[in-house]
Amino acid sequence: MKFGTKAIHAGQEPDPTTGAVMTPIYQTSTYWQASPGKHQGYAYARGKNPTRSALEKCLAELEGTRYGLCFSSGMGATDAVVKLLRPGDEVITGDDLYGGTYRMFTKVFEPFGLKFHFVDMKDPAVIRKHVNSKTKLIWLETPTNPTMQIIDIEACAKIAKEFKLILAVDNTFASPFLQNPTNLGADIVMHSVTKYISGHSDVIMGALCVNDEKLYTDLAFIHNSCGATPGPMDSFLVLRGVKTLHIRMERHCFNGRKVAEFLKTHPKIDKLYWPGFPDHPNHDIAKKQMKDFGGMISFSLKGNSQEEAFRIASSFKVFTLAESLGGVESLVNHPATMTHASIPKAERERAGIVDSMLRLSVGIEDIDDLLIDLKQALA
Ligand SMILES: *Cc1c(COP(=O)(O)O)cnc(C)c1O
């Protein structure tokens, strides 16, 4: 089956007890047992819930993996991956990470004796240089947030195989529609389901998708033991949202391209970050590993004035000034003071996140209205 058919049907057979076409919201914490330990596959809902199981199957199919696990947030999913490690282990990761991931790595896990190397992952040789006998995990994000760098997943997978490391890819920005990291050799795909997969800005959720049975068993153990599992209502909302992922993504990509083309020639724009332009540093890799280039675009202003960026951010009529991304509605965000405020200024600026940078999550509204809005806000 192809992507759109899977998005609508995978894991979602009519309910066996009633024939309900939509997977019911199994709002229960516990399940009847005929005799101690004799149940129908469900004992306690932290471990398993049928609504969540349906979604986990669907997401696994969309990523092309054998197993899926849903978490109560994207951070909950990332947390479970790091808990595969032990004190003294080392991780190689990017220098342009989601701010919350950077915060978790440095503030939560470094004190537990893990070491993180934040490196420029655009060059696989830099990654290779940081591998030593303690390295256990490569964690990458592509496209990165907010500077839309493209990391070569296949090249990283080669290094991971050579040194027997786990390669985990945060696939949130691309969504499973545009990119499937396990097909390129990654071991774990992580999603903030909150974003494109859910698509309607009404749920916080995360997911992990894997092929290896041992890895799945270890992650499922952490999932149940540590308990960052989502409830059935949220699982239902995401099952509803994911059914239109393929058509939403097509429109995000179409609108994204039009907005990027408009900004490219705008006199106020200094740098523009979008992987669809042939002059983007890793455009060829983006073309190789992604189906299209998505609706995430960042730019900075000539003169680099934060005041000017604030003025623009506050004068949109269709774009909403808010954190997050990937919903049907267009959003604008000021990374330096909003999504990336937890990253020290010097490190932020090294990654190109300057004070005048704005990040757009281009939604699926009518493109004419989005372009009119951009024109007036930038005027
Ligand atoms: C939002 C986001 C996360 C965190 O996910 P939550 O669902 O907010 O916990 C991780 N990575 C990326 C790239 C994100 O955009």
Image (tube, rainbow, N blue to C red):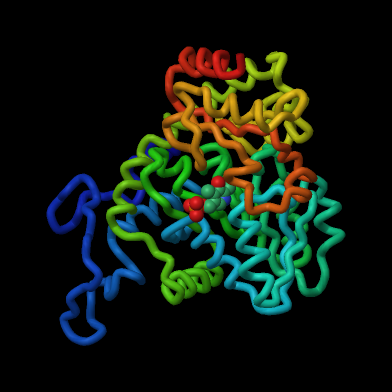
Q: Is residue 307 visible?
A: yes
- Drawn side of residue 270 relative to residue 183, left or right: right
**Can you give x and y, in whole percent of width and height, for residue 365 in the image?**
43, 22
- Drawn side of residue 180 relative to residue 343, left or right: left
In the rendered view, tell whether residue 96 sits above or below residue 373: below
In the rendered view, tell whether residue 91 sits above or below residue 379: below
Q: Residue at x 71, y 48 (%)?
A: 96
In the rendered view, tell whether residue 59 sits above or below residue 356: below
Work out whether residue 219 or residue 17 is closer to the camera in this orientation and state it: 219
Q: Given the current orientation, which residue lies at the most extreme bottom position?
A: 36
In the rendered view, tell whether residue 148 sits above or below residue 365: below
Q: Residue at x 63, y 32 (%)?
A: 358
Q: Is residue 275 visible?
A: no
**Can you give x and y, in whole percent of width and height, for residue 295 in the image?**
55, 30
Q: Residue at x 68, y 71 (%)?
A: 110
Looking at the figure, which quarter contains the C terminus? top right
Q: Residue at x 63, y 49 (%)?
A: 341
**Can you give x and y, in whole percent of width and height, for residue 286 in the image?**
68, 35
Work out whether residue 153 or residue 317 is closer to the camera in this orientation and state it: 317
Looking at the figure, which quarter contains the N terminus? top left
Give the quarter of the image for residue 199. top left
Give the quarter of the image for residue 338. top right
